[in-house]
Image (tube, rainbow, N blue to C red):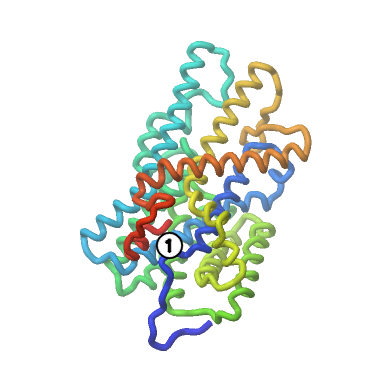
Amino acid sequence: MTQPASLPVLLPTRFRALDAWRGICAALVVLFHVPVLHIAKDWPAFANLQLGVDFFFVLSGFVISHAYQERLSSADQARGFLVARFRRLWPLHVAVLAAFVALEFAKLAYATINPAFGVEAAPFSSGRSPLEILTNLAFLQSFGLHPGLSWNGPAWSIAVEFWTSVVFLGVVLWWPGAKRETFLALALGSALVLAIVSPATLFVSSDWGFVRCLFGFAIGCLVYDLRLRYALPARLLGWFEAAIALAAFAYMALVPMGLLHLTAPLLFGLLVFIFSFEGGPISAALTTRIPQALGRWSFAIYMTHAFLFQILRTGGTFLDSKFGLGRMVMHNGDKLVTIGSTWQAIAMLVLIPAVVIAVGAFFHRFVEVPFSGKPRPGATKRPPPETVAAIQRA
């Protein structure tokens, strides 16, 4: 690793390889949540697919630092930052929440007509109560106000990410000369809190999810500071990319739940640092059409997949009740579809994520893009570089 003597480090407007990594991690989270009973559901390492969320947090800290760290010094700029973050996260969140609420009303209406209607849970019961609509609208569902996840479960992470962005704003505005030290303190403090309150697992969400997000986000901010000051030898980037990619997948396959999981954001921070240079063959592959599309759609994929799986559970429960198919079973507290053979299960694990990706692409095009201020796909007019940086995916 080298450090330039005086010349400033010139960074790209957008880190395309990291966008693709975001898409890969979103796909891994979807794969973990697919409501099909298969042999991997009982593998301890399968739960590590959830670490994709921690990658999101680290990457958000990195790209938000890149887009805004030097652009926040006044009340107007701070207001613009919060509006941009809100527009980035809230519209799609509300659209999916509305779909969940509509599904509950449909269940309630049918159950009124046919009291024998079999559902996986009573309409508007715990986790989908009217009060929880309000907390979800205010991004407050992940602060221990409810016993577990509510409505669109994956939305817990974007809720805490919004409030973590507020913390970022405070650090940049009030301690601009001590950003590095403050983010280091936030990272160490968050790790200590997580080690105390949840030593058995990093997978906290509705209770300590904000601290989990703050931990990864602060590490991402620190990685950005390193990226500004240090460079890797170009001739070795291919080796570095291969090594860190292999290490990341080995980590997810081998590291058990527990305190060791606190090292995951550190590993992801190293991955973000290396792939931000986009100088190796893996980066070249990640900047091709399909990985880039997956990256563009990743937020919509992540936000919509739980609703699609809820439809599958509700429909499967209804069919079980009506025709006695016996395909729905409880497994570790989750209602899953059982498949007859291993090959059928594999086919479902390919088909269902494919449907999720297609739906995510639709919501990206018609909800996320129009409301977030992002340029529409295929737009010919190129915005100024500073505008592009400001709306960088985070």
Question: Who is closer to the viewer here, 38 or 67?
Answer: 67
Position of the C terminus, as image quadrant, is: bottom left
Is residue 205 left or right of 145 when viewed as pictured? right
The reply to whether residue 64 is visible in this rendering is yes
Identify which residue is drawn at 54% across, 62% down. Answer: 287
Whether residue 175 sits left or right of residue 203 in the image: it is: left
On the image, numbered disc 1 is attached to which residue? 61
Q: Residue furthest left?
A: 75
Residue at point 44%, 85% (across, down): 4
Q: Residue at x 65, y 66 (%)?
A: 247
Residue 77 drawn above or below residue 345: below
Q: Nearer the viewer, residue 378 or 269?
A: 378
Please tell me which residue lies in front, 358 or 327.
358
- Residue 393: image quadrant is bottom left
Secondary element at tag 1: helix
Q: Please rate how many residues cluster around mark 1, counting C-alpha atoms within 10 Å: few if below 14, some from 14 to 19, many from 20.
A: many
Q: Is residue 299 above or below residue 355?
A: below
User: Residue 85 placed where, x, y %?
Assistant: 35, 53
Outermost residue on the front side: it is: 380
Does residue 216 show up?
Answer: no
